[in-house]
Amino acid sequence: MNKGESKPPLVFTVDVEDWANSTLGPERPITDRFLEGLCRILSLLEEAGAKGTFFILGAAAAKFPEAARAVAAAGHDVAAHGYNHVPAYSLGRKRFREELRRVGDCLAGITGVKPRYYRAPDFGVGADSLWVLEVLAEEGYAVDSSIFPFRGRRYGIRWWPREPRNVLLAGGLSIVELPLPTFEVLGVRLPAAGGGYTRVTPYRALKAVLSAGVRGGWARVHYCHPYELDEDEISAYRHNTSLKMRFSQRLGRRGTFSKLNRMITDFKVISIKEFLNTYKINTYEPDKKAFEGAS
Ligand SMILES: [Zn+2]
């Protein structure tokens, strides 16, 4: 980038959870292994003088409250990632609302501030579960960042706007949706970065897709997990897991810290709070039918 040219903005988000518990199943115990990765990410941001948004799993915060405390003390956004690591769509409206209140109370009890931004575990807001956005708005949430706008095998909404939008809901409510980053090849949308996509993609390609087109007044959202910096976790994990799972989950962990480090240098890293204060967000009104279903 030439001297004097402004860096492209990037909303920096972190999903704070334990690998085995979030990836293999909520019945697996939450261990303290994620704390080290979290400290490294906090140090990285501190050195750069940048702020990020941390979507913290309630069950992980309940077991290790120092994680949420450290995030809040450093001035980052404390946001909610559900209480247990299960997709929002699997819960139905009533149980989802209960889970949301539980994680909200848990994080508020530790940090003194009720979270207002949310990301569903496993990007678990699909075309059939947009009612999640309604429940979030009813419960006082200002932002959701759960929708991956591509046709994925396990998640995603193919037709959802790729840019941030203020989503108009029933009853005069609204919520800002900050979708995860995608790019298009021959009209087909693909995930651009974040988590495993960041681990397996060369940095130059990541930089290109995350900077493309963002100078028109909006930023892309990047996500990572503290456990992705833990190179030895998979080989040290002694419990039953498939070889395929071990391979895919270990892939690229070695290079992740350096990619995050370069990202923080090459982009103007901001938190969701900073994003909301800086950018004008256009409205979007999905078809009403999309909100039906789920009692
Ligand atoms: Zn998660």
Image: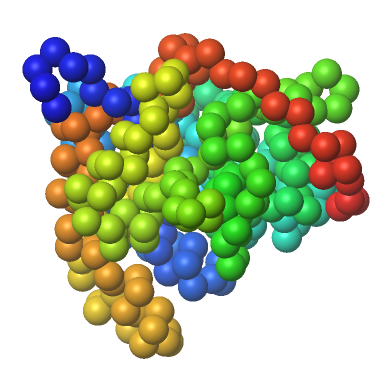
How far across and how far down the image is residue 117, in percent?
A: 56, 31
Q: Can residue 107 be seen in this view?
A: no
Would you place residue 281 above or below residue 198 in this image?
above
| Residue in the foreground of this view, choosing between 68 and 228 | 228
* Residue at figure coordinates x 78%, y 22% from the top left: 173
Would you place residue 44 above or below residue 7 in this image?
below
Left or right: 222 in relation to 254:
right
How far across and how far down the image is residue 291, in percent?
A: 83, 42
| Farthest residue, direction front | 186
* Residue at figure coordinates x 35%, y 31% from the top left: 10
| Farthest residue, direction left | 3
| Residue in the foreground of this view, choosing between 269 and 190 | 190
* Residue at figure coordinates x 46%, y 31% from the top left: 78
Q: Is residue 257 visible?
A: yes
How far across and how far down the image is residue 17, in percent?
A: 43, 54
How far across and how far down the image is residue 36, in percent?
A: 24, 51
Would you place residue 43 above or below residue 149 in this image?
above
* Residue at figure coordinates x 33%, y 83% from the top left: 238
| Residue in the foreground of this view, choosing between 271 and 163 | 163
The image quadrant that residue 71 belongs to is: top left
The tally of labels here is 0
Q: In which quarter of the image is the N terminus?
A: top left
- Judging from the image, the colouring scheme is rainbow
| Residue in the foreground of this view, choosing between 274 and 267 | 267
